[in-house]
Image (spheres, grey):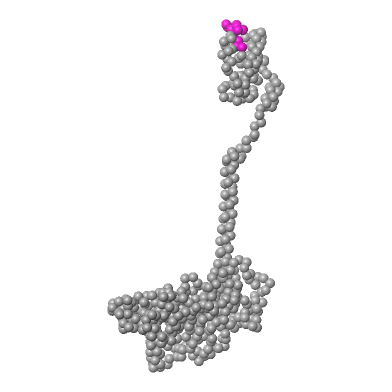
């Protein structure tokens, strides 16, 4: 009996109900009481549990619940001194007692913090917080990018930043008062936009010139126009027919400037002229005179102006130009022709000298060059040739002034170049450079070009930039040089 009790003392039992506790369990599966550490179960608790178990067995045997027939061969000494007591139904713990024990047990348990299953572990909470911050930041970036795109789109359509320089018609002054300001007695017109106001073009070096050829080629006479332009600008395109001439002057960073001399027959009298707003920028050199017996002096003084043409749809932004216009157009817009969707004035034909313009896009230097070129246009009258003798004399005079009069505007064929002498090929090749003001180290060339009325030497040989030549001039140089090589010309290195 004693041996049995001692062998059982290594087992663990609940101190509340005496039920056996399996290794590793932290709570009693019978009553829910917390299990103490293995070393914390005192001998007194074990003895008490054994006594409770023995008392219950004695009571059962006294009541007849256990006898020799149901437990043959069992004696009192067979009852373990410290074993789990299995309570009989009539000796079950009352519900009130159980609740009391449960309350006492709960009071003795350490407080456990509740688990929030919605937030997860601290690491998950940190990841969730970072994710939320990233989403908010990404949303803000998208909003900023979208707002910037809208800003740039509006700026490119209107030619100015949104809200900058609000339209007078939308403010306290209507379009009528605006036109009245443009027609003040001093004829100065309204002030130019801030980016063009007070622009100084006196320092712009206009080292190259272009002279129109329509009057000479048509044989009918008429005005001849000439304009000047700086280095790095090129005559990119020319088109001359029997009644019109179109020229495009451009460089790599500024808007293209257009010169058009076209027949009045191209006017569309059925089209309505758009509403025009004109702003003075600078005075121009153009001085009208008489052409083919008709005086155009009533056009008066000319200026470079900013011209805004209203779009067909009121919601669309206007088309903006910088253009050469009569100053009188500030007061009377009928002095300007706009039925062909660009600023024009009548001078024999319809003349236009202009470029498309966007506010706030170009540097001050680019603006100065644009205005200076537009302000440089001049005109002279070419009398009509009425006889074969005068035509011949004019052709002879022109031929004496140039070897190849239009080598800057027309691709020369090999057959016509082959008709020139070796010396003339030499002069023709360098004539292309001379048109752009290049000086020469050769005394022969300096002597030859010095007598030409169109030659204005302004660029030293070492400072000359061949990028000023247009495609037509480059191709003609190659064609001339090829023939010179075939002839073993003494004028090439």
Query: Residue at 36% across / 77% down in the picture?
Result: 476
Decide which of 246, 27 is in the foreground and name it.
27
Q: Is residue 188 visible?
A: yes
Estimate the x, y position of residue 215 in percent, counting from the top left: 45, 86
Give the tally of numbered discs: 0
Q: Quadrant of the N terminus?
A: top right
Estimate the x, y position of residue 42 in percent, counting from the top left: 63, 18
Estimate the x, y position of residue 434 in percent, counting from the top left: 41, 81
Estimate the x, y position of residue 330 in percent, counting from the top left: 60, 80
Taking the magenta stretch, the answer to whether it contains residue 468 is no
Q: Is residue 342 above or below residue 57?
A: below
Decide which of 259, 87 is in the foreground and name it.
259
Query: Residue at 65% across / 16% down in the picture?
Result: 44
Report the span colored magenta.
Answer: 68-81
Q: Quadrant of the C terminus?
A: bottom left
Query: Residue at 51% across / 82% down in the picture?
Result: 377
Magenta stretch prevailing secondary structure: loop
Q: Is residue 77 above or below residue 207?
A: above
Residue 184 in which image quadrant: bottom right
> Is 480 displayed left or right of 465 in the figure?
left
Residue extending farthest left: 487
Q: Is residue 35 above or below residue 281?
A: above
Q: Is residue 278 visible?
A: no
């Amino acid at each position: 009996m004693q041996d049995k009790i001692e062998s059982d003392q290594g087992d663990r039992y609940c101190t509340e109900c005496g039920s056996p506790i399996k290794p590793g369990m932290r709570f009693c599966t019978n009553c829910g009481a917390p299990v103490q550490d293995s070393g914390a179960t005192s001998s007194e608790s074990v003895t008490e549990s054994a006594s409770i178990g023995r008392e219950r067995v004695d009571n059962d045997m006294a009541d007849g619940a256990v006898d020799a027939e149901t437990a043959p061969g069992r004696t009192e000494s067979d009852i373990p001194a410290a074993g789990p007591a299995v309570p009989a139904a009539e000796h079950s713990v009352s519900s009130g007692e159980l609740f009391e024990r449960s309350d006492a047990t709960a009071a003795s348990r350490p407080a456990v913090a509740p688990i929030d299953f919605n937030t997860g572990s601290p690491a998950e909470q940190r990841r969730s917080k970072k994710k939320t911050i990233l989403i908010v930041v990404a949303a803000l970036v998208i909003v900023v990018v979208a707002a910037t795109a809208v800003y740039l789109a509006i700026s490119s359509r209107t030619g100015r930043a949104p809200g900058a320089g609000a339209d007078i018609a939308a403010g306290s002054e209507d379009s009528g008062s605006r036109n009245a300001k443009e027609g003040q007695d001093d004829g100065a017109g309204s002030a130019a936009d801030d980016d063009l106001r007070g622009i100084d073009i006196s320092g712009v070096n206009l080292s190259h010139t272009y002279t129109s050829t329509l009057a000479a080629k048509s044989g009918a006479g008429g005005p001849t126009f000439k304009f000047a332009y700086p280095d790095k600008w090129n005559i990119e395109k020319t088109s001359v027919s029997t009644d019109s001439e179109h020229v495009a002057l451009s460089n790599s960073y500024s808007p293209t400037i257009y010169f058009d001399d076209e027949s009045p027959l191209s006017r569309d009298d059925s089209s309505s002229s758009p509403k025009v707003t004109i702003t003075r920028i600078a005075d121009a050199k153009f001085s009208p005179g008489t052409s083919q017996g008709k005086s155009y002096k009533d056009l008066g003084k000319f200026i470079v102006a900013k011209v805004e043409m209203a779009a067909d749809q009121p919601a669309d932004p206007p088309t903006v130009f910088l253009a050469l216009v009569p100053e009188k157009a500030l007061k009377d817009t009928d002095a300007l022709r706009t039925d062909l969707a660009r600023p024009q004035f009548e001078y024999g034909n319809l003349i236009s000298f202009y470029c498309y313009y966007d506010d706030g896009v170009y540097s001050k230097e680019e603006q100065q060059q644009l205005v200076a070129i537009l302000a440089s246009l001049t005109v002279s009258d070419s009398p009509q040739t009425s006889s074969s003798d005068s035509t011949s004399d004019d052709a002879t005079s022109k031929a004496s002034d140039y070897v190849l009069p239009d080598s800057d505007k027309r691709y020369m064929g090999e057959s016509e170049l082959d008709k020139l002498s070796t010396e003339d090929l030499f002069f023709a090749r360098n004539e292309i450079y001379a048109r752009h003001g290049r000086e020469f180290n050769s005394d022969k060339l300096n002597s030859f070009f010095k007598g030409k009325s169109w030659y204005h030497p302004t660029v030293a040989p070492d400072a000359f930039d061949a990028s000023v030549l247009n495609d037509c001039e480059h191709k003609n140089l190659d064609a001339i040089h090829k023939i010179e090589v075939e002839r073993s010309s003494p004028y090439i290195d």
